[in-house]
Image (tube, rainbow, N blue to C red):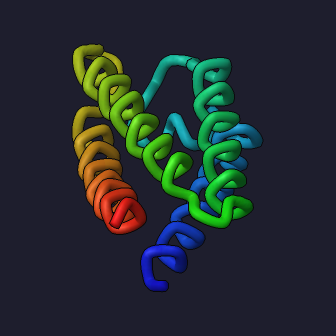
Amino acid sequence: MKEIRLARGLGWFSVGLGLTQLLAPRWLERQIGIQSDRTGLMRALGAREAATGLLALTQDKPTPSIWGRVAGDAMDLALLGAALKSEENQKNRLAVAIAMVLGVTALDFACARMLES
């Protein structure tokens, strides 16, 4: 089933991103244009991301975990949008990060809908 393969791929993506957020939060903040130290928040988001990814990898039908990814994407988009309001953050990098999250959100949503079928 292609939707299961996609879910597993998204699961691995979550694990990788989550580990990056947990192990290198300041590096990732700089890459996406956040100038202030939000290490605690980044690590909390990383724990959520990694847990959701592990669930997607271990469930026979990972529909709930993929919908969890969609919810996490919404949270990430809200936080990135809030970060745009700060004058100290790099808006061009944040815009790229938002575009990337929107792309992954589209994949997550499509996968969740396919899994429901």
Left/right of residue 40 with respect to residue 101 in the rendered view: right
Percent across and percent down for residue 76 are: 40, 33
48 displayed left or right of 5? right
Residue at position x 34%, y 49% in the image: 101
Give percent across and percent down for residue 81. Answer: 26, 26
Closer to the camera in the image, 93 or 55 = 55
**Residue 15, located in which quarter of the rendered image?**
bottom right
Q: Could you tell me residue 20's position as x and y percent?
A: 67, 48
The answer to whether residue 97 shows anywhere in this view is yes
- Asked whether residue 31 is in view, the answer is no
What residue lies at 49% left-to-right and 41% top-to-bottom? Answer: 68
| On-image quarter of the C terminus | bottom left
Give the residue at x 52% y 75%: 4
Residue at horizontal 39%, vertical 28%? 75
- Residue reaching furthest top? 86
Q: Residue furthest front?
A: 117
User: How many numbered badges does the structure rendering display?
Assistant: 0
For the residue pair 77 and 7, the one nearer the viewer reads as 7
Q: Is residue 42 left or right of residue 98?
A: right
Give the x, y percent position of residue 43: 67, 29
Compared to residue 30, the image places residue 85 above or below, namely above
Q: Is 52 rendered above or below residue 26?
A: below
Give the answer, above or below, for where 79 lies relative to 31.
above
> Residue 9 lies in what quarter of the image?
bottom right
